[in-house]
Amino acid sequence: MLGGEFASLEEDIEKELVEDDSERPRKREDWRTRRDQPEMPARPHSDGVGVMVEEIYEVQVVDMFEMSSVEFKLDPQANGVVPALILAGVVPCAPWSPTVAIKIRVLEAYRVTHVRCPHLGVQSFVKSLCDLHGVPYRPYLCQQFSIAYDLYLDIHCRTDEQVMHALGRDSPWQLKHACPACTYKLEGEDALVFDMLTTMDGNDSLKRVLRREKVPMADSEMGEPVLGKSRERVDNRDAGGRAASTDEDNPCTDRWKNMINDVTSNMWGIFDETGIFLALCRHGFVLVIADMIKSGELAKYLLAVVKELLDAFGMKLGAGYDVGCHFETTVANSELGAEAREKKLKCLVGSFHGHAHNRLCQLRVLATYVEGMGLEDLEGCERFFSRSNGLAKSCRYASRFHWQQEITTYAKHFDAFETYPNLSKFLCNNYRQALTILKTEGALQAWMRQEGVDGVDQFHEWLAEEKVYLEGLKGAAKTNTETLEMEYVQKLVNLSASQYVFVCASTCLAKYQVAAAEAQRAKGDDGTYVLGISKEDRARRHAQEKMEKDLERVQELEEILEIEERWTTASSKWLETVGEIKKRKYHIALDQLELLIVERIFELTKMNQSQTGYKMRKHIAEALQARSKAVKNAIERYNNAAAALSPPHAKAELGTGGGTNHGRGRRYRLAMDHYFKILRAREEIKRLNIEIARVVTWIRDENTFLQRMLANLRDGEGKSEKERETNAHMAVQVQLYQQRRGRFDASHLQRFRELAQMPGFTGSLKCGVSVEHREAQQRLRELRAEMGASAEEDEMEVDEGEGEAAEEVGRKEVVSADSDEEDEGHKAKEEAVSGLLYQISMLAVDGGVRVGGENE
């Protein structure tokens, strides 16, 4: 029996046991863990009187100068706490039940400051906030800030994607229209040698330390941690049928190796990403970025980038690279060779690195001597890397996600707020530089009259003569003038050497057999010894095979030369042929030495030339210092060959050239380079006149297009309530996009007006007609013709006043189609016509549109 205090409890338990379980409501058991359960949305609740009230959520809010506890009234329409907090202007630091949130303006302040000064990282910024708030720094604060910042950047990225999708500017469009000066082509433009100039280079500053992730034991044979799948694109190309790689026509093959494997092999085990490979247009806009994975600057990255550029931009592309001379051979022997030749791809070398190349290579690919280059130096990647190197601190120990996030965010900001604002400055400064160079043409003509130079054609002849002279030296050094008699003597020498090696190997084998037999008898063996395969036996067999091969080649030459008795060292023919061999080696060594010395004289000319910067001089000096080893080796080979002659020739010493001057002299070479620089200045002005007109037209068309898109989004006629609300939000983002891109247009136009007032300006600031606009109209006519439209409709021109009508025409044509028609092709054509009409209505402008407040 239980005590009195448990009597009532015992009665209740007995009643529950007697009652039917079906009468009691059962609570469904939830076997899901907290991790798997979805977040319950914050919903309004009743106060008991029938009035719905909003839920209150308290969170610690981090502002720029303070941190306070704030109670938020959650929006009933928000699907959860996190969306409700974001709508309130703060970003939480946790996905479920957040207790800390950071204001959006704090995150935006860090984003803008970080991309402007990449050295500033999350830790430094969080420590600064702690100092402003008067609280001690804790490591977990960085993690909280990083979580909120990742969410904020993700919102930014998704918003930009939706805006670009609404504008019809998805990923392919963005690459093909990255630079308005390069890609926004107009009708009636003059033809250029290169439709687009790009520059490529690799950089190893943005390396990332490898972080190995463990995989389940079943996925690893030994149960050890292994890396995941390779992130490289699988190469399914067929290597068969292609010509073998050859660099016979490349004078820089043995001298330039970017990111040599021996240098980078030590860091492959430490770093996962070893840097980036970048491609820019000549104005500095980022085109393609490739990750370099556990390797140096290999050719596969260049080929991948060139493939993307060829697919996006097509014909007549000029690609600058540090070792473009070597890369040209690589492209020609790759699968891209046929496409590159068809699209007239030209591999070039930048001015900074080009002056340290072989002189013969400079005559082929240096920007000064390449037609159509203008004043472009193709060194934009170096300028980009000088700024992006500040990201190294934030990228070195980051995760793969944050590593890519840092680089992508910086590249987008650099294009929008560095390259584009300075686009007009770049064009105007190049124009002024070209005009300054053209002013020196009179001084060149006066020098030509004084020196008796007949005309400018003489400079082209000098350049051709220099190229022929250097190629002749190179060809003479490599020409195989060896006769059969020389080869016969050499094979006799080889046979004598192989016979000696065979005799030595046989002697060693015999000694080994005797020693092994004695060792067996010393151990009590009966004296029988079975010979096994040893290294001595193997060496003797190899020596015998080589001797037989040399003997066979000697016998073949004796049959060809009809030699009855084999030559010996005392034969007259032997002595005569040996003398010819020594003379041949001497002449080859002399030609190689002359080639190196003459090339060094030409290259020293640029180093001692005026207006050559300190970095350029230092770069050339380092290249020449490294090349001096080749000169010393050539002198040593020459001295050995000269001493072998009978009688011996005089030896050469470094620094005793006696002032020998090859070519036309230093003054003539400077005059020749000056003339070609004037030619490049004229080409630069021609290109700049085209690019300035493109930028002016692009500013007008872009503003018109965005204004029409805003008007269309704000027009709620015939749309549902949900569509009007969505379009209103999108219109706000499109307007912000227009403000970001349009804030610099006034400064662009002002710079162009100032340039147009300069003497010597031959361009025009009048807006043209985009080729894309005209192609869209032509495509519209073709589709209408296929659908049997009337001739009057084919001749219709869509102008600014017909924008709204064009969209209505598109609707009417679709509605007027036979509803019972089942032809899928006809419906597709109708949709294409409607889409083109709408696109043209968005792009259509007339001559009276004002740009920057004035009629252009």
Image (tube, rainbow, N blue to C red):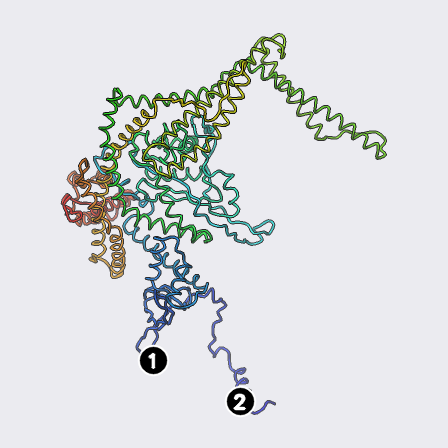
Mark 1, Cα crowd under 10 Å, few <14 / some 14-19 / many 20+, is few
| Element marked by disc 1 | loop
Outermost residue toward the bottom in this view: 4
Residue 80 seen from this side: no
**Residue drawn 38% across the image and 64% down it:** 129
Between disc 2 and disc 1, whose residue precedes?
2
Residue 705 lies, with reference to residue 326, above or below; the image says below
Q: Is residue 141 left or right of residue 809?
A: right
Disc count in the image?
Answer: 2
Residue 221, labelled with which disc? none
**Mark 2 — residue?**
8
Percent across and percent down for residue 706 are 23, 50
Q: Would residue 831 be found to the left or right of residue 98 on screen?
A: left
**Residue 355 to residue 116: above or below:** above
Q: Can the viewer see residue 624? A: yes
Question: Can you tell which quarter of the image residue 196 is in?
Answer: top left
Find residue 835 and report its horizontal and vertical position in percent: 25, 46
**Cα distance in 3D space between marks 2 and 1:** 34 Å
Residue 447 appears left or right of 624: left
Q: Quadrant of the C terminus?
A: top left
Nearest the eye: 85 or 772: 85
Residue assigned mark 1: 48
768 lies left or right of 223 = left
Q: Nearer the viewer, residue 671 or 457?
A: 671
- Classify the position of the N terminus by image quarter: bottom right
Disc 2 on helix, strand or loop?
helix
* Quarter of the view holding residue 576: top right
Residue at 27%, 48% in the rendered image: 421
